[in-house]
Amino acid sequence: MTAEAKVQIAVVGHTNTGKTSLLRTLTRESGFGVVSARSASTRDVSGVALICDGTPALALFDTPGLEDASGLAEALDAQPEAADPVAGIEQFLAGDHGQGRWEQEAKVLRQLRRSDAALYVIDAREPVQTKHRDELRLLGACGRPLVPVLNFVASDEADPERWRSQLARMGLHVQASFDTVVYDAAAERALFDKLGVVLDAHRGLLQRLMQSREAEREAVTLAACRAVATMLVEVAGQRHQAPLHVPQADITEALRRSIAAAEQRCVDAVLALFQFDLQAYQPPELPLTEGRWTLDPLDPEALRSFGIRAGSAAATGGAAGVAVDAAVGGMSLGAATVLGAGLGAAWSGAQTFGRPWLDRLRGHQQQVADPAILALLATRQVALLRALLRRGHAADTPVQMTPTAQGWPSAPLRDAVLRARHRSAGGLAATGAEHDTAVSPVAHQVRVAVGAT
Ligand SMILES: Nc1nc2c(ncn2[C@@H]2O[C@H](COP(=O)(O)OP(=O)(O)O)[C@@H](O)[C@H]2O)c(=O)[nH]1
Ligand SMILES: [Mg+2]
């Protein structure tokens, strides 16, 4: 597939500068290659193609790190004189590569000769050193345009300005910056634009590729917001009913299980949409182990971690029940809101409060998800979406989520969910106009709350 691509780009640079990581982020494949803080984790050239309009448009080739450019530069100087630098490189490639001493370097140079251009990846936290100058001289001798990519720019130690001026002194004026562990749409667009500058004949293709990637990103964001909205509307409308003789705790347990399952389906769908690896998640505040929230949605502890304050009964570990005073966002969720203390035992206290959860008059009992639970579900899904939207596919640290919201992520989202509640009462249509009417306004508010506008 890489061979069919119209443009071939070699990704080159010193060991450990983030070449493989750059490929992961650009291809949205967190499984591409081997990324490691150890040296020389990439030993061979491997390629992957970016698709545009259904056909391979741009092939990216990951290469081993250059480790001894200075030694090789000296050896090249000692070679019989060649017509020009490119001929000198060809001569070296045709030989025994210094009896195998520069095998790695030979793989890189050969790939660059076969490519249209190279991205030269730099760890911007490092100072500019002789090894970099030697590398650039060697790569420059291959007769292909080089676009330096300053990586690690999100780090405090990075000094991109110094790098920019030094690269300019070496004749490299078209440069890009990137941080492979952070997703940044503008930086990505700039990278493709810079490639378009040095590859003028392919500029149109690179622009179309960028547009199709942006459209894909938009579709993924929309679908993720819809997944969250669908889950919220579904959970909001759930009515768990049973005849009077069924113990209330059993109904609560059924409700708890079905809410947990709905949230899990939503998390799975969202992670799959963004093509993230489930193993990468161990958020400290919102423990999600292998894609599963370890805190139960009905757990007062989970509510507390979102600033939804549980009453004193929970704080003291009281077994009887928890009155949650969730006066948030200018509207009280109801000081009378009663939640089960983990086990749901306290739901039996529900009838002492105003909500008709247990409709004994009609000869059956019914339980619904409390607004405080909907607030919790909304808050953690919005926090997850925010984190994923900022996450590059090279990130290997846990998702960091610091939900600052108290209660609902926003008042309009709360209103939209509560309004949709009656529409989905007794079950939400899987598709169709009815589904859309219930879900669309919520999806819109999820998107606004996420800040992906
Ligand atoms: N914080 C941060 N870490 C990065 C970035 N790029 C790469 N890394 C880390 O740097 C190490 C080397 O990355 P790798 O992609 O294997 O480098 P390569 O040898 O050039 O292919 C790995 O531990 C990566 O997780 C970046 O932009 N920011
Ligand atoms: Mg590598």
Image (tube, rainbow, N blue to C red):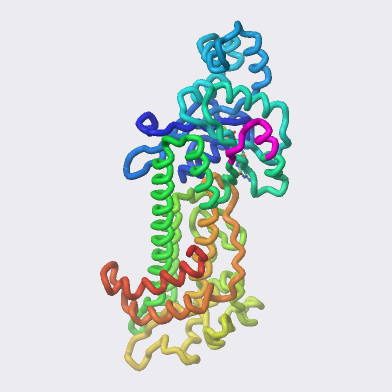
Q: Quadrant of ligand 1?
A: top right
Q: Nearer the viewer, residue 405 or 282?
A: 405
Q: Quadrant of residue 134?
A: top right
- Furthest-bottom residue in this view: 361
Residue 256 higher or lower than 55, as above or below: below
The residue sitting at 59% across, 28% down in the picture is 65
**Front-lying residue, 239 or 422:** 422
Q: Position of residue 174 (x, y in %)?
A: 58, 38
Q: Residue at x 40, y 81 (%)?
A: 419
Residue 368: image x %, image y %?
41, 80
418, above or below 90, in the image = below
For residue 178, say whether it is visible.
yes
Q: Which residues are magenta?
A: 165-175
- Whether 303 is drawn above or below 184: the answer is below
User: Is 171 in the magenta?
Assistant: yes
Task: Name the residue rendered at 48%, 41% in the picture.
Answer: 31
- Report if residue 150 lies within the magenta region: no
Residue at the spot x=39%, y=46% of the render? 208
Q: Position of residue 14 (x, y in %)?
A: 63, 30
**Left or right, residue 302 beside residue 133:** left
Nearest to the observer: residue 351 or residue 431: 431
Task: Pick out the residue farthest to the top.
Answer: 80
